[in-house]
Amino acid sequence: MKKVSLMLVSAACACACAQQIEFAKERKATVKRYRFVGNHREESMWSACTHAEAAHFYEFDPATETMRHIVDLTKLHGERGEGINTNGKIHVRMGEDNEGNVYFGSLNEDTGPECIDPSSYKGAFWYRYCPKADKVEVLGKISRHFGLLGMVMDPKYMRLYGLAEDGHLYMHDIAAKYTRDLGKVDDWDICRTIFADDEGNVYGSYPVARIWKYDPRKDEVIDLPNIRLECDNSVPPRTMSKPMIDRKVIWRVIEWDPVEKVAYGIIGGNSMLFRYDVHAGPEIANDRRIYFAPTASGSFDYVGTSWDVHDEEAFQAKLAGGFFPPVSYLVRYDLKKKQREALGLMVTEDGCLCFGMGGACTGQKDGRIYFVGAVEEKDEKAVVGKVSRRWPFSMALVAYDPSKEVK
């Protein structure tokens, strides 16, 4: 047994060394890392904020390059220390109105003490952050049990739309101060991002590779059966234990472009970039460039653990030929030239790898491209978890500066 163990360790070391050599040959997209302030020990991030024992709301000032913690949602609701399920996650992309107010929604996903009666949860809520008052206020309850996975703010009708865990579309009228359940539009696995067009219509994706639409003038949700996303069915499921979670056949992220009046999105399974013209019928097709950061070498889920299949990671490694960190690559698509360019393996200025990146946006003040996610952590005191129990990481905001590219 000792000899076999030694051989396995030697093989693992050899594999790790080979990986480092290969990474050294890669083109690099250098990003700047900004650590979160405080001792909240976040270990994951979805779209805009973090979730762990609580959901935290932060502000980053690009002018001073400083991070500030604004609110802990469990404290805002008086949930901390009460032994109940908490508002421990902000999964949605935030929306901003013309006055600079920021809107978002919450949910509970296994946050709070284990083995606690789920009815102890107070429910999910809509929020607004007012920069002038420097205050987060609760606008109202979304649902008694189900929080949001996706959200969009529609400036035409000044409404918030949220797609919840129960597959229902919820709407909050900001001026009238009420929330409505618009009905069921999806089933598990729920679409993670939705968008609104210039006429106030709201769109989402559902399996298999289809699209639904909410028309506010008709107050009606309809499926668009003749439109299909160009998914690749040869891509395996995201997880071997739950193949029904088939995120390869829905869009993972989508953004409305107010210039062309079309939407640009990315398919979940293979990171395919597509264009959806909502006005021209069933077409899927600052610098007018789109940046996104898909992971390579394997799937990514922070410290997620599968309890359904015995040693699922070992099984996946056998198929892949080894254990590989889910490194992130920065990819850019030029809308004018219609050209796709791989900018390289994402690494920090001190040489740390970037693993799962999310929450991408363009800084309106500085033109840099921002992501939040897991970054390789070499300081043992700062480690918050290990991706797949192998690669230590901490959470960080990272920024890519296109102006510093070598021409």
Image (cartoon, rainbow, N blue to C red):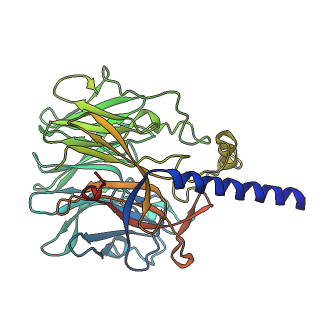
Q: Nearer the viewer, residue 180 or 104?
A: 104
How far across and down, in percent of the image, does residue 158 sit? 12, 51
State which quarter of the image contains the N terminus.
bottom right
Residue 129, picture quadrant: bottom left
How far across and down, in percent of the image, does residue 343 sit? 37, 48
How far across and down, in percent of the image, does residue 110 sit? 50, 60
**Does the rendering let one see residue 184?**
no
Is residue 139 found left or right of 250 in the rendered image?
Answer: left
- Across the whole image, how many numbered discs are drawn on residues? 0
How far across and down, in percent of the image, does residue 386 sit? 57, 63
Q: Nearer the viewer, residue 377 or 343?
A: 343
Residue 78 lies, with reference to residue 343, above or below; the image says below
Q: Nearer the viewer, residue 343 or 201?
A: 343
**Does the rendering let one see residue 17?**
yes
Please report the residue visible at 13 percent of the width from the left and 63 percent of the height from the top. Answer: 100
Residue 241, picture quadrant: top right
Residue 147, picture quadrant: bottom left
Please report the residue visible at 54 percent of the width from the left and 37 percent of the height from the top. Answer: 237
Is residue 206 found left or right of 238 in the rendered image?
Answer: left
Please report the residue visible at 65 percent of the width from the left and 57 percent of the height from the top. Answer: 17
Q: Give the residue at the far top of this rendering.
A: 226
Is residue 216 found left or right of 246 in the rendered image?
Answer: left
Residue 84 lies, with reference to residue 162, above or below; the image says below
